[in-house]
Image (tube, rainbow, N blue to C red):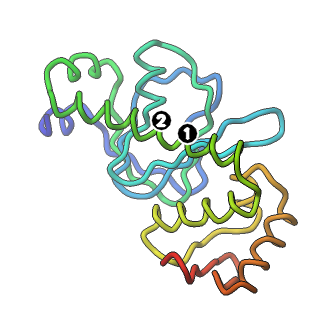
Amino acid sequence: MKEEIIAKGALVHFPAGQELMRPGQYIRSTLLVAEGHVKLYREQEESEFFVYQLDPGMACALSMICAAKQERSNLLAKTIDDVTAIVLPITIMDNWMQQYRSWYYFVLETYRRRFEELLEVIDNIAFKSMDERLEFYLRREVRHSGSGTLGTTHQQIATDLNSSREVISRLLKKMEQQGKLTLARNQIVMRTYG
């Protein structure tokens, strides 16, 4: 399988902030993230809503589904930082699912993980206040980054949580006063989750 990935895949580098997938776009390949992070958003008119993130070692479940069924994407994917990924043509997916048990289980695990993340997002929207959603978001970002220091802006958090920058700034200031984090320019240092 490793030999086939090397033979049929292409190692590609994407700069931070690049759109990898747009709503309405047909998908012809799937992406295995080697380095960096990719966030996927649901777009509605003028706003974006954060759905899930791809970290190193992960693949995009949506690209696997849409490509296999020759459907259009309904999500936007953007690189958060510089990303190195292996791009695999979707034409090999069916064969690999049958030929390689490890690939079959990898794909199933990818779907399962994305479904669990989607349930977390729904739970947060339906059952939690914005300050609880913000705290959950920050904990998840710390888990993804592997560091207690997050390099992000209040506006980026507001976009991901479908809120306003003013609301996020007020809630972050409140969390700082509670001793949960320290705010700096384009940086949040978590105290209780690191």
Question: Dots 2 and 1: beta carbons under 8 Å?
Answer: yes
Residue type, mark 1 in image: Leu
Give the residue at x 57% y 35%: 21
Q: Is residue 176 left or right of residue 114?
A: right
Residue at point 71%, 60% (across, down): 156
- Rendered image: mark on residue 68: none
168 w.r.t. 58: above or below: below
Crowding at dot 2, Cα within 10 Å, few <14 / some 14-19 / many 20+, comes out as some
Instruction: Where is residue 134? Give x, y as percent.
Output: 69, 62
The residue most toward the front is 127
Circle 1 SS class: helix
Which label is found at residue 119? 1
Q: Secondary structure at mark 2?
A: helix
Q: Is residue 167 left or right of residue 74?
A: right
In the picture of the structure, the residue carrying the numbered disc 2 is 115
- Residue 57: percent from the left, percent from the top? 32, 50
Looking at the image, how many numbered discs can be counted on the residues? Answer: 2
Where is residue 96, by image quadrant?
top left
Residue at figure coordinates x 58%, y 79% from the top left? 190
The answer to which image quadrant residue 1 occupies is top left
Q: Amino acid at mark 2?
A: Phe
Q: Residue reaching furthest right?
A: 166
Q: Residue at x 61, y 59 (%)?
A: 137
Q: Nearer the viewer, residue 186 or 53?
A: 53
